[in-house]
Image (tube, rainbow, N blue to C red):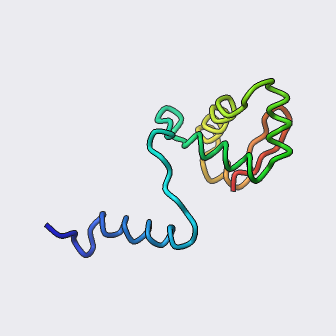
Amino acid sequence: MSAKVYGEKTFEGAVESALNAHGWAPGEPVNFNRELALDTAELAVFLGRTQIREWERLRDAYGEDPARPFARLVAKEIDARGALNVLRTGVKDKGIRFRLA
């Protein structure tokens, strides 16, 4: 059976193709934390690449890999303030500001 021209799968495929054409790559399902509703691996990679100094400062503050506690904080902030606000204004952990968009 072929996909409906105006069906959900067709729309999803078109959106994913457009994103892929502009450098986006789908994440690995195993990295998606259902409890937090976040891809914790991609979050850590994003911060490690875009905010290197801040991420290192956070690593020093925690004394270990900050990925887990930071992901929990981001999820808590999204629950409290909403995803759009968190993306617009970022979050602060241990006095260190992080941009998420």
Please determine whether, in this image, residue 9 is positioned above or below residue 27. below
Q: Position of residue 76 (x, y in %)?
A: 62, 34
Please determine whether, in this image, residue 90 is positioned above or below residue 74. below
**Quarter of the C terminus within the rendering:** bottom right
Position of residue 8 in the picture relative to residue 95 (left or right):
left
In this view, the residue farthest toward the left is: 1
**Quarter of the N terminus within the rendering:** bottom left
Please determine whether, in this image, residue 45 is positioned above or below residue 12. above
Q: Position of residue 72 (x, y in %)?
A: 63, 31
Q: Position of residue 24 (x, y in %)?
A: 55, 63
Quarter assignment of residue 70: top right
Q: How many numbered tags mark residues here?
A: 0
Q: Position of residue 89 (x, y in %)?
A: 74, 51
| Residue at 27% from the left image edge and 73% from the top image edge | 6
| Residue at 85% from the left image edge and 29% from the top image edge | 60
| Residue at 60% from the left image edge and 37% from the top image edge | 75
| Residue at 81% from the left image edge and 34% from the top image edge | 58
User: Which of the pair 46/38 is nearer the observer?
Assistant: 46
Quarter assignment of residue 66: top right
User: Which of the pair 88/42 is nearer the observer?
Assistant: 42
Please determine whether, in this image, residue 11 is positioned above or below residue 33. below
